Image (tube, rainbow, N blue to C red):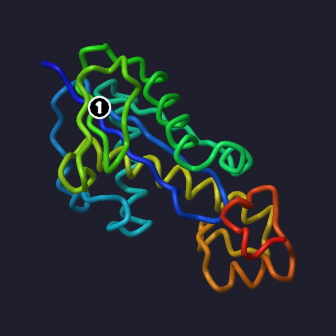
Amino acid sequence: MKYSIGIDEVGRGPIAGPVTVCAFTFYKKVSFPKTLPKLKDSKKLSPAQRELWFAQIKTWQKEGVADFKVSSVSAVVIDKIGIVPAIQKALNSSLRSLAPKAQSLVLLDGGLKAPFEYKKQKTIIKGDEKEQVIALASIAAKVTRDRYMQKMAKKYPEYGFETNVGYGTKKHYDAIAIQGVTPLHRRSFLKNVVK
């Protein structure tokens, strides 16, 4: 049985932190535990629900029935090459780390594209709502990125990263006005704010 690979990204829009892409695949047919919340796009799950799913993803990985790879590209690189090439860089890295067979079907969310050597690929609008492997990739990417930003909140406590995870909330912009930017900030996203 051939299994498809799901790919999704998180962190396209924040003004701070990396952009993160996950590639997820099953190696065997699995049944989802009834105790888990309904599988949805990560943005439609609460942080607690995402953590439950992520724990399940790690369990499947330990059992050898699934695998996933997450890659992030920093704000510094985003500023240097732009958000779209940065997403592509993270995507290529995640997919190649998963080392799928060339004939694997790669399912991608939104406007994402896999490298050309993956002949069987399909980009699906709202793929994270239609394909389980994309929804699971979206959850793994989101939890990984959010945990990183919460860790960074300890280093830069003034910016509220533990709650905004790098998105441009009023409190976050107010903190930039007072404290300035950190190495985590995407200066290219703050051209009107940072001189």
Image location (x, y in percent) of residue 61: 38, 31
Q: Which residue is mark 1?
A: 5
Splitting the image into 4 quarters, where does residue 123 fall?
A: top left
Residue type of the residue flagged with mark 1: Ile
- State the quadrant of the N terminus: top left
| Closer to us: 124 or 27 | 124
Image location (x, y in percent) of residue 149: 64, 59
191 over 169 or under it: above or below: above
- Image-based side of 179 in relation to 71, left or right: right
45 over 108 or under it: above or below: below
| Residue at (52% x, 46% y) in the render | 84
| Residue at (38% x, 46% y) in the render | 8
Splitting the image into 4 quarters, where does residue 119 fall?
A: top left
| Closer to us: 53 or 174 | 174
Image location (x, y in percent) of residue 77: 70, 43
50 over 134 or under it: above or below: below
- Image-based side of 21 in relation to 154, left or right: left
| Residue at (44% x, 66% y) in the render | 47
- Image-based side of 44 in relation to 83, left or right: left
- Image-based side of 156 in relation to 119, left or right: right
Image location (x, y in percent) of residue 112: 37, 42
**Number of numbered discs visible in the structure rendering:** 1
| Residue at (57% x, 50% y) in the render | 83
In the structure shown, which secondary structural element does the residue marked by tag 1 occupy? strand
Q: Residues within 10 Å of mark 1 (few under 14, many from 20)?
A: many
44 over 120 or under it: above or below: below
- State the quadrant of the C terminus: bottom right
